[in-house]
């Protein structure tokens, strides 16, 4: 009975140590009751990866990072040991990828299985091939830096061009010309204001007078006997149409002259004959006119 209390205290201490160890590992996500595979990977830069970081396959957590060791004597100075649940088969050709875990900058290990896995599996303790996949934040940072660098280069080039233009005499001449143009515009504006004050009222009065004259003409037109004028015009047009109808018909002299071909030929023949007669009369007047003084006396004596 002398050592009963010491035994109880020892047993309680062991239980407390076990519970502390179990609770600590439980909080870290380590299942001490399950056996784990151990795999290694070598990196020259771990980009902020920490111990207890998750190990995933296609987003599903299958283990965690156990240890990170640094060896400054090697180029690939970081050796990472990860543990994977033993119920997960890791086929030969699997790669250990260092990836971003969310947008807050955390890192994780992604086990990338081969596209066509074979039957052979990786053994615990093997070193797997590694790679690094930049996250979204790093891509944005790289693109932002590239864009910022390009923008700075463009601004620097623009500043240099402005400095060269400012040092050029042509710019000074251009500014002087702009100043002269501004002065001319001021003068023109002042002249326009004077013109508006002097001429525009007169122009408005003339326009009002013209509008009143147009209104008076319109009123006179409205007051005229347009109906009677139109009736007289219609009557004259009707008379002209009647005359044209008579001319186009066979009645009357004009109609016969236009439509009777025999009358036209007779008149034409008569005109030709008259023309021939006049021509012959001019050529031989004695044939048609006789002068005899003695003959006239004899005729008078016989008559007595």
Image: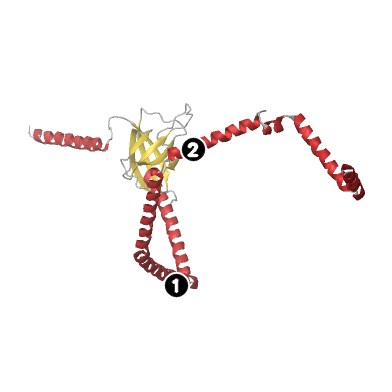
Q: To which residue does mark 1 refer?
A: 176
Q: Earlier in the sequence, mark 2 or mark 1?
A: 1
State the count of labels.
2
Gap in angstroms between the C-alphas marked 2 and 1: 76 Å
Image color mode: secondary structure
Task: List the single residue furthest toward the left.
Answer: 1
Comparing labels 2 and 1, the label whose residue is closer to the camera = 2
The residue nearer to you, when weighing 203 against 283, is 283
Q: To which residue does mark 2 refer?
A: 232
Q: Quadrant of the C terminus?
A: top right
Task: List the single residue furthest toward the front.
Answer: 304
Please give the name of the residue rendered at 56% of the width and 34% of the height, measured from the top-left corner.
239
Residue 155, image x, y percentages = 43, 60
Query: Quick check: 110 above or below 148?
Result: above
Please give the name of the residue rendered at 15% of the width and 33% of the height, measured from the top-left corner.
11
Residue 117 is labelled as none
């Amino acid at each position: 009975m002398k050592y009963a209390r010491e035994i109880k205290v020892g047993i309680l201490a062991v239980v407390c140590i076990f519970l502390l160890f179990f609770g600590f590992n439980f909080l870290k996500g380590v299942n001490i009751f399950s056996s784990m595979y151990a795999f290694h990977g070598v990196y020259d830069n771990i980009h902020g990866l920490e111990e207890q970081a998750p190990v995933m396959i296609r987003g599903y957590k299958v283990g965690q990072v156990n240890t990170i060791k640094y060896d400054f004597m090697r180029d690939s100075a970081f050796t990472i040991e990860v543990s994977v649940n033993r119920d997960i088969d890791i086929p030969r050709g699997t790669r250990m990828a260092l990836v971003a875990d969310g947008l807050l900058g955390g890192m994780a290990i992604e086990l990338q299985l081969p596209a066509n896995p074979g039957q052979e599996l990786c053994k615990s303790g093997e070193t797997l091939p590694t790679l690094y996949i930049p996250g979204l934040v790093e891509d944005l940072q790289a693109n932002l830096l590239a864009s910022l660098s390009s923008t700075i280069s463009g601004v620097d080039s623009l500043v240099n061009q402005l400095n060269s233009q400012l040092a050029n005499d042509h710019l000074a001449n251009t500014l002087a010309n702009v100043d002269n143009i501004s002065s001319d515009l001021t003068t023109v504006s002042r002249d326009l204001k004077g013109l508006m004050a002097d001429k525009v009222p007169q122009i408005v009065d003339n326009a009002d007078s013209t509008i009143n004259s147009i209104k008076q003409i319109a009123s006179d037109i409205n007051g005229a006997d347009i109906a009677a004028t139109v009736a007289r015009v219609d009557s004259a047009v009707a008379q002209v149409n009647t005359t044209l109808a008579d001319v186009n018909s066979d009645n009357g002299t004009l109609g016969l002259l236009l439509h009777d071909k025999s009358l036209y030929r007779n008149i034409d023949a008569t005109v030709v004959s008259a023309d021939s007669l006049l021509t012959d009369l001019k050529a031989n007047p004695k044939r048609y006119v006789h002068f005899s003084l003695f003959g006239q006396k004899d005729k008078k004596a016989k008559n007595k």
